[in-house]
Amino acid sequence: MNNTNNVRTWLITGVSSGFGRALAEIVLARGDTVIGTLRRPDQVDDFEALAPGRVFTCIVDMTDRERLGSTITSAIEQAGGVDVVVNNAGYGLAGAAEELSDDEIRHQMETNFFGLVTVTQAALPFMRAQGAGHFINISSLAGFSGVPGMSIYSASKFSVEGFSEGLAAEAAHLGIRVTVVEPGQFRTNWSSPSAIIKAKRVIEDYRPTAGQVREGVTAVDGVQPGDPVRAAQAIIRVVESPDPPMHLPLGADAVEYLRNKLNTWSDELAAWESVSLSTAFEE
């Protein structure tokens, strides 16, 4: 592993802003190395100026899976390996399931899930060879509790959760760890009008549910309670822990959503347990 004297090489997708940028700035200030992905060439100079010689950038399209994988592999080789992969790149898609087009749905899944899988597959051979590594996969409170008006976004994050849990079980004996981070509302540009994507089609029948979410999702931009810097510090604590969690909700809202989900599941399981157990062949 590259973390001799606690110096690590991080691969962080989506470092232009938000969690990715905050985390990159903190670990670079500590003396670590960062491989960062960006979407536009005009963002490179600004990012590389943070720590010349310890920053490796690559321009990627998370939906171009063939080129994405080879680009990530080349960047890791150039950096001399990787210790921590933070799968952070993604965006929000607002709209009822019936309102969304096939192209809108597929682009959401390609970016938030399939792109994450491709980056993970590119990094795994390096971690297997060194017998150590840690994946931090950024999900959302929508990854464990489906959000009306963001059902496809929720599906993309539920996919991240299932993939991460399966990967953790597959790779633990190889020294590879996996943590899913589930943020609530943080003051990033995720919900800004320029970042959130809204369904082009509007069906009036969904106005009381998905419509309210679609119209209100940008209203919280700039006033969210969560601090991205503190979220980045929490992620670093997880990476440095000898016993990191499988799941890490971040923010009071995420903790509340998770508790409510667990309580609802527990109550539902108890109420329907006799039915659940009635399905075996009679002896």
Image (spheres, rainbow, N blue to C red):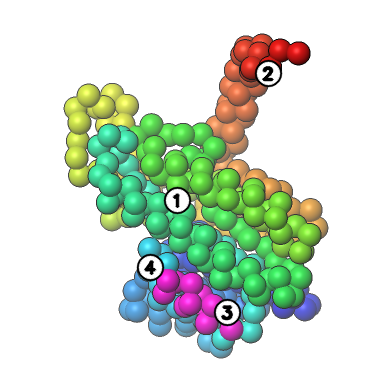
**Image location of residue 72, percent across then percent down:** 51, 75
Q: Marks 2/4: CA distance?
A: 46 Å
Q: Is residue 88 magenta?
A: no
Residue that carries the numbered disc 3 in the rendered image:
76
Q: Which mark is residue 279?
A: none
**Residue 188 in which image quadrant:** bottom left
**Image location of residue 193, percent across then percent down:** 28, 51
Q: Marks 4/3: CA distance?
A: 18 Å
Marks 3 and 1, the one that precedes in the sequence: 3
Q: Give the camera-side residue of 255 and 245.
A: 245
Q: Secondary structure at mark 1?
A: loop
Q: Marks 3/2: CA distance?
A: 51 Å
Residue at 58 percent of width and 50 percent of height: 163
Local packing at callout 2 (Cα closer than 10 Å; few below 14, some 14-19, many 20+) is few
Residue that carries the numbered disc 1 in the rendered image:
187
Residue that carries the numbered disc 4 in the rendered image:
64
Q: Is residue 75 magenta?
A: yes
Check disc 3 and give the amino acid type.
Ile
Q: Marks 1/4: CA distance?
A: 29 Å
Check disc 2 and give the amino acid type.
Ala
Q: Main secondary structure of the magenta part?
A: helix
Residue that carries the numbered disc 2 in the rendered image:
280
Check disc 4 and give the amino acid type.
Asp
Q: Marks 2/1: CA distance?
A: 50 Å
Q: Marks 3/1: CA distance?
A: 30 Å
Marks 1 and 4, the one that precedes in the sequence: 4
Q: Which residues are magenta?
A: 66-77
Q: Are marks 3 and 2 in contact (CB under 8 Å)?
A: no
